[in-house]
Structure formats: C-alpha cells, structure tokens
C-alpha cells in the first residue's frame, strides 16, 4: 500500500481518478485567450504589491489573498468582489523541471509538486530545499540588475504578483471545486526584460524562450469570502 502523499503522484492512479472525477459539464478555457490575459497581467504589474492588487481589482473586479482555511491550514480566498467564470485567479509558482531534470531529492515528502500532462513538474514548495533551490536558480538567471522571476511568493505575504498563490489552493473535491488548472507556455519574447521579475516560475535547467506556467481559472463565479478550491483532477 502506497502512502496517500505518494500514491496520488503515480500516473496510472492520476489517470484513473481523472477519468472518474472529470466534470463533463466544465467549460475548457480558450488557451489563446489565457495567454493574452496572462501576458497583459505580467506586463501591467509594478514593484508595489498594493498597486498590483488594485490593478487586478480595477481590471478584473476581484482580489485574492491567503487566509486561514477550514479545509486545511491555509488557503486562497476571494477577498473582495467576484471572480467571474473564466477569470485567472492564480498562478502556480515554483521551479520547473523538464523531463530528464533531477527532482528526486526535492520530491521527498513534498506535497507541493504539480505534474503537468506532458511530464513537466512544478515544485511549488516555498521552504526547505525547494525554496532555497528556487532562489538559487533565480539568482543564476539574473541578467545584470534584472531578476527574471518573482521571489516574493516564497514568503507567502506581500506578494509582488498577487496571483502567485496557486500552490496554496486546497482540494475541495469534484463537487466543491471552483477552479481548474490550465497549462500554458508563455513566449518570453512577449514579456519585456524588466517585467519578467513578476513571473513566479524559474527553469531548473538551461533557460528557454518559452516558460511553462500553470494558471488557475474559475469554472464558476467565486464571491467575496469564498475559498478557491480545486479538485486536483481538472487539468487542461
């Protein structure tokens, strides 16, 4: 018998449960529109966290934040307004491991690792070896005075990118979930160098002109005070 924390990472188990729990009525977002939305958000952020919260509020009509959760420890909540269906309500931050990259040590007792459909992993753990490794890769990829990724999410507070909290989203099960995970590949040539410091992801290995990102998209309206919940099976 596998421990629950490891069993859910096994591909056969993930596949069978995805088929079992997939919501046939769930709307699959248009990836081209998601790419435009994320690029617009990244290109609009500034160095002031409060200003970025205001930007999301003014352009999308909601804000999100990390709070104590009745589901498990901490969670992500809509803190004002309503996140309408189709809204990007979070990014999944962390170090990106492409197939062939070594992730064994970082994966031990790590429930923050997200597995993409093509074998890419994102390690969203903000502390321990994972947190230190992310920061090391971030400094390695620095171009002169310019950071090429966001480090603020590691502290879980005062997020410069207010949406970089997707790793904290709790599992609500298929009946209670209100977001789905959507995989996109951002063309970094569309993001000016000075704006890349708002991307909450870094590649473990050699840099690429494309950056894998996983965004959380609302599958229904999420009102002020509601917790953002996934099913851990809704990946598009």
Image (cartoon, rainbow, N blue to C red):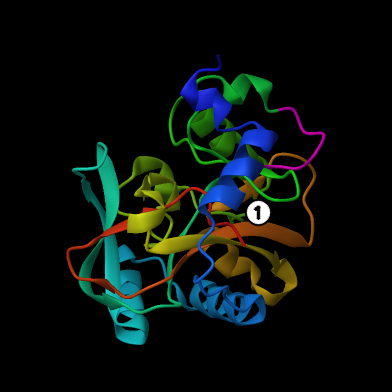
Locate the N terminus by quadrant.
Answer: top right
Where residue 150 sits in the image (x, y, percent)? Answer: 50, 53
- Please state if 79 lies on the left or on the right of 58 as rendered: left
Query: Image quarter for residue 195?
Result: bottom right
Q: Which residues are magenta?
A: 96-102
Comparing 41 with 75, the one in front is 75
Query: Image quarter for residue 205?
Result: top right
Comparing 107 with 219, the one in front is 219
Residue pictured at 77% horizontal, 50% vertical: 207
Above or below residue 138? Residue 24 is below
Query: Image quarter for residue 119?
Result: top right
Few, some or many C-alpha atoms within 10 Å of disc 1 (few <14, some 14-19, many ≥20)?
few
Q: Secondary structure at mark 1?
A: loop
Above or below residue 55? Residue 161 is above
How many numbered circles does the render carry? 1
- Which secondary structure type mostly characterizes the magenta part of the structure? loop
Which residue is identified by label 1? 144
Furthest toward the top, the residue is: 1
Instruction: State whether residue 50 appears in this view.
Output: no
Locate the C terminus by quadrant.
Answer: bottom right
Furthest toward the front, the residue is: 20
Residue pictured at 41% horizontal, 49% vertical: 152
Residue pictured at 63% horizontal, 19% vertical: 105
Residue pictured at 34% horizontal, 49% vertical: 172
Above or below residue 221? Residue 155 is above
Where residue 8 sits in the image (x, y, percent)? Answer: 55, 32
Where residue 117 sits in the image (x, y, percent)? Answer: 70, 51
Q: Is residue 66 magenta?
A: no
- Please state if 99 lies on the left or on the right of 22 as rendered: right
Instruction: State whether residue 8 appears in this view.
Output: yes
Where residue 185 sits in the image (x, y, percent)? Answer: 70, 64
């Amino acid at each position: 018998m596998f421990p629950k924390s490891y069993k859910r990472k096994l591909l056969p188990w993930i596949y069978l449960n995805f088929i079992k729990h997939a919501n046939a009525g769930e709307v699959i977002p248009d990836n081209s529109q998601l790419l435009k939305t994320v690029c617009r958000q990244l290109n609009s952020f500034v160095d002031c966290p409060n200003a970025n919260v205001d930007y999301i509020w003014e352009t999308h009509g909601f804000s999100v934040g990390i709070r104590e959760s009745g589901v498990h420890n901490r969670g992500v909540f809509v803190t004002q307004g309503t996140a309408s269906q189709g809204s990007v309500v979070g990014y999944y931050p962390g170090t990106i491991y492409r197939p062939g990259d070594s992730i064994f040590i970082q994966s031990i007792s790590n429930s923050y690792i997200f597995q993409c459909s093509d074998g890419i992993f994102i390690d969203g753990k903000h502390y321990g070896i994972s947190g230190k490794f992310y920061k090391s890769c971030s400094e390695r990829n620095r171009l002169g005075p310019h950071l090429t990724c966001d480090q603020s999410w590691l502290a879980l507070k005062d997020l410069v990118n207010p949406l970089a909290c997707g790793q904290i989203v709790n599992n609500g099960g298929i009946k209670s979930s209100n977001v789905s995970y959507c995989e996109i590949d951002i063309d970094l040539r569309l993001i000016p160098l000075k704006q890349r410091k708002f991307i909450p992801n870094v590649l473990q290995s050699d840099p690429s002109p494309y950056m894998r990102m996983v965004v959380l998209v609302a599958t229904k309206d999420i009102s002020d005070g509601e917790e953002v919940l996934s099913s851990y099976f809704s990946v598009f």
